[in-house]
Image (cartoon, helix red, strand yellow):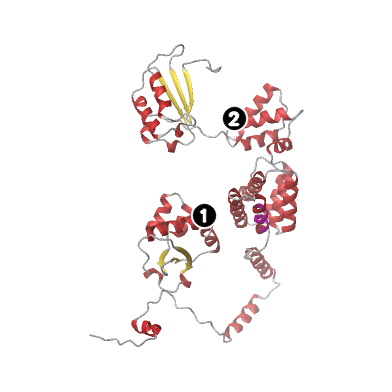
């Protein structure tokens, strides 16, 4: 069977053999008894690729299979199989292997094959394999073929196109301190070394994620002592909020690169944006000022009572107040009837980020082409940036346009900024027309 010469075991790739005729040929063969083995076994790989007709042709055989026949249906996407097929099968879900188990297996293979490799290199291969032993063995095999002598971590990274941790560290450190020039210089060094853009961005995202994990749990496995010390220094100089925002920003760059022909340009402009102090709201600076003030009060270097008296005197001075906007009672605002359907459609389609940001909103039609989405609790800058992403905006506009029956525009408005549409009365309409009109009341 392992040599592939046993006719009682038949393997079929459904990705290339997915027609009704292919299944019919199996259905005609199942009546024959096995020649050597106890059963005739049919292994259908990538079974979710079968056509609807092929599934229907297979269904009858699965319902009443001969006693000497076994079917093994293999797929990575069981949700694509019809319910009629799933209900007639025993299901076995294979989970990813842990990195520790992959390392153990690789050590056994290296001992039996006479391959010399460092512990760090094995850990990197295990991480790159993402839970698949086959992928880990493939990487190990490539390393052993192209490298003479002992395999180390740098050789594994070079083989798969991953930049050195030093390059990634320099770029991330420059982004943290808003040093755009240094960030671009580090980027150019990696690109000049011939590294893949996608791999580079993936390494940057992973490195920022690891800094966030280290800041949260103080636990990382794949780094050596010196690298952990550097990660510790970086984690102390940055907040969790900014690390999370950086991961979102880097992921957005990755998404933009997928659909762009100028991947290098998208990466460079994205790094410039993240390393430029444009969207910085001064939160860290404000925190530092508050901490400095608290330290002065605690040390007695500032007279808190005198400061309060000075503030009180200033407060007694007359201050010209800006005229307040008339507040709108948003709770009594009647929303468009179709808006709950739009929000529910986002939930059913699995777009939970959009759903969670829009579930308490109301929608009003401003004019024939514009829908205003009003946020009773206010709209944060982060939420607005998220909703205005091209793919998210496109999804909202599509659902709203479908409900309205025509192409519509969508705008986002805070409740305090919302101005209700003023309905013109007859007298206003007469003034606008500027022609003599007699209004007769009966």
Looking at the image, residue 222 lies above or below residue 414: above
Quadrant placement of the C terminus: bottom left
Residue at numbered disc 1 = 391
Main secondary structure found in the magenta portion? helix
From the viewer's perspective, tell me whether residue 20 is left or right of residue 183. Answer: left
Dot 1: what SS?
A: helix
Residue at x-position 71% and y-position 25%: 115
Q: CA distance from mark 2 to mark 1?
A: 35 Å
Q: Nearer the viewer, residue 317 or 195?
A: 195
> Residue pushed farthest left?
442
Q: Is residue 270 located in the magenta-colored stretch of the structure?
A: yes
Q: Nearer the viewer, residue 74 or 434?
A: 434
Q: Earlier in the sequence, mark 2 or mark 1?
A: 2
Question: Residue 240's image quarter?
Answer: bottom right
Question: Residue 68's image quarter?
Answer: top left
Residue at numbered disc 2 = 134
From the viewer's perspective, tell me whether residue 393 is left or right of residue 253. Answer: left
Q: Which mark lies nearer to you, 2 or 1? A: 1
Dot 2: what SS?
A: helix
Looking at the image, residue 112 lies above or below residue 219: above
> Residue pushed farthest top?
36
Q: Which stretch appears magenta? A: 267-272
Q: Is residue 268 located in the magenta-colored stretch of the structure?
A: yes
Looking at the image, residue 154 lies above or below residue 1: below
Residue at x-position 63% and y-position 29%: 137
Of the numbered discs in the image, which one, if any, rests on residue 193?
A: none
Q: Nearer the viewer, residue 7 or 336?
A: 7
> Residue pushed farthest front?
435
Percent across and percent down for residue 399 are 42, 56
């Amino acid at each position: 069977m392992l040599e592939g010469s046993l006719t009682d075991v038949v393997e079929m790739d459904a990705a290339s053999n997915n027609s009704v005729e292919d299944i019919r040929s199996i259905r005609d063969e199942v009546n024959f008894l096995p020649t050597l083995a106890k059963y005739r076994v049919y292994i259908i790989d990538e079974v979710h690729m079968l056509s609807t007709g092929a599934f229907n042709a297979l269904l009858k055989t699965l319902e009443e299979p001969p006693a000497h026949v076994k079917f093994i249906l293999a797929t990575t996407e069981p949700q694509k199989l019809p319910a009629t097929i799933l209900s007639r099968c025993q299901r076995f879900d294979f989970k990813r292997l842990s990195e520790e188990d992959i390392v153990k297996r690789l050590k056994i293979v290296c001992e039996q094959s006479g391959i010399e490799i460092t512990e760090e290199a094995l850990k990197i291969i295990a991480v790159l394999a993402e839970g698949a032993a086959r992928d880990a063995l493939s990487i190990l095999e490539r390393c052993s073929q192209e490298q003479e002598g002992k395999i180390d971590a740098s050789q594994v990274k070079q083989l798969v196109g991953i930049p050195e941790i030093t390059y990634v560290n320099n770029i991330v450190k420059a982004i943290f301190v808003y040093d755009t020039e240094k960030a671009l210089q580090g980027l150019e060094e990696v690109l000049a070394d011939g590294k893949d853009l996608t791999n580079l961005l993936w390494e940057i995202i992973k490195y920022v994620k690891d800094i966030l994990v280290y800041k949260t749990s103080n636990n990382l496995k794949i780094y050596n002592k010196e690298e952990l010390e550097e990660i510790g220094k970086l984690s102390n100089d940055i907040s969790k909020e900014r690390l999370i925002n950086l991961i979102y920003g880097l992921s957005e760059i990755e998404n933009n690169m997928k659909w762009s022909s100028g991947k290098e340009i998208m990466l460079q402009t994205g790094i410039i944006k993240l390393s430029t102090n444009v969207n910085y709201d001064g939160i860290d600076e404000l925190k530092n000022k508050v901490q400095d003030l608290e330290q002065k009060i605690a040390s007695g270097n500032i007279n808190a009572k005198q400061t309060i008296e000075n503030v009180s005197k200033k407060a007694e001075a007359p201050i010209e107040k800006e005229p307040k906007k008339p507040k709108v009672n948003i709770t009594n605002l009647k929303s468009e009837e179709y808006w709950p359907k739009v929000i529910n459609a986002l939930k059913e389609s699995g777009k939970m980020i959009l759903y969670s940001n829009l579930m308490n909103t109301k929608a009003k039609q401003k004019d024939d082409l514009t829908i205003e989405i009003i946020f009773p609790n206010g709209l944060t800058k982060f939420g607005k940036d998220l909703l205005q992403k091209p793919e998210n905006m496109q999804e909202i506009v599509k659902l709203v346009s479908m409900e309205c029956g025509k192409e519509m525009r969508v705008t986002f408005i805070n409740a305090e900024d919302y101005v209700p549409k003023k309905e013109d009365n007859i007298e206003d309409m007469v003034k606008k027309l500027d022609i003599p009109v007699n209004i007769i009341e009966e």
